[in-house]
Image (spheres, grey):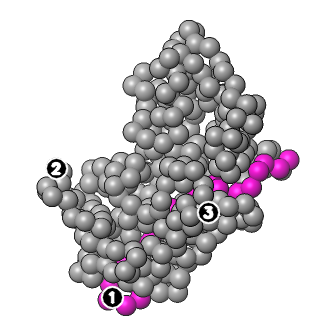
Amino acid sequence: MAVILITGGTGMIGKRLTEHLVAEGHEVVIFTRKLPDRKPVKNGIRYALWNIEQQTIDEATIRRADHIIHLAGAGVADKRWSVQRKQEIVDSRTQSSALIVKALSEIPNHVQSVISASAIGWYGPDTTESRKNGFSEDAKPDNAFLGETCRLWEESIEPVTALGKRLIKLRTGIVLSTQNGALVEFMKPLHMRVATVLGTGKQVVSWIHVDDLCRMYLFAIDHPTISGAYNAVSPSPVTNQELIRILAKQMCGRWYITMYVPSLVLKIVLGEMSIEVLKSATVSCRKIEGERFIFLYPQLVNALEELLGK
């Protein structure tokens, strides 16, 4: 089996992806700033040092690697978007990519592919065409902050192709997981039987079950003919209102109340980030389906049933 390096391996997606990779028999090496005090619980997982600011990385690990999965980046929704935070979001992605490019160009290696995270923030608000067919991978990046971030993110890892490495960029939608992320935030008010709809609730949410996303990374590794950008979203986007209604029914049955959070309130609380929360983006997954990737959870109802253990 392959030796697979992961950056950002301690985050929500990285942890779950590591479980998938180990289950498939791969050896996983997670890049970290500080080695853990205790050995990992599971076999097949090791840790190696890197430092993005100092642009240093464990050379021996690069020499052994077959594939690199690049997830590293400061959480977009973790803090309010101050000027400093926005720069941190961009730098954490572009500088980590630069370190990977530098390592692959200077250290002898046999890395076959680099699979890099990206995001559907690449796309702007829905248009009449996207509402009908969804944004495809050839759409131009949006001019807003997240669109520009995604453009810089993808451009920063692109030089690996000149080094003869196959590059796959997965533009990821809202990842549904009960460990962290948007779904956990949606669930919190429902513990008090309150279903909170954001704004009008009509904005389209392009989502993906965390296990389908992990399977897509494995698919990219196992299919050497694919390269370039792919949208990592389910075939069935829903509106925010539909998402909350389905989630509320599964958690509370019929006994809940619906509360709409006005757009103005979201703008006051979230600042510039509210633009993305209220933005409608219908994103197509036809390209990855054309490569014969099969979703285990194409419908939101089934995805939530699995995640909530229904």
Q: Is residue 235 visible?
A: no
Q: Quadrant of the N terminus?
A: bottom left
**Magenta highlight on residue 124:** yes
Mark carried by residue 9: none
Tell me the crowding category of disc 3: few under 14, some 14 to 19, or many 20 or more residues within 10 angstroms, Cα based: few
Q: Quadrant of the C terminus?
A: top left
Residue found at x 50% / y 62%: 117
- Residue 159 appears at what percent x and percent y? 53, 82
Seen from the viewer's position, the closer of residues 74 and 205 is 74
Location of mark 2 (residue): 41
Task: Describe the element under mark 2 as helix, strand or loop.
Answer: loop
Q: Is residue 270 left or right of residue 109?
A: right
Amino acid on which the number 2 mark rests in the picture: Val
Q: How many marks?
A: 3
Task: Describe the element under mark 1 as helix, strand or loop.
Answer: loop
* Bounds of the magenta segment: 104-128
Residue lying farthest right? 128
| Image-quadrant location for residue 219 | bottom left
Seen from the viewer's position, the closer of residues 50 and 284 is 50
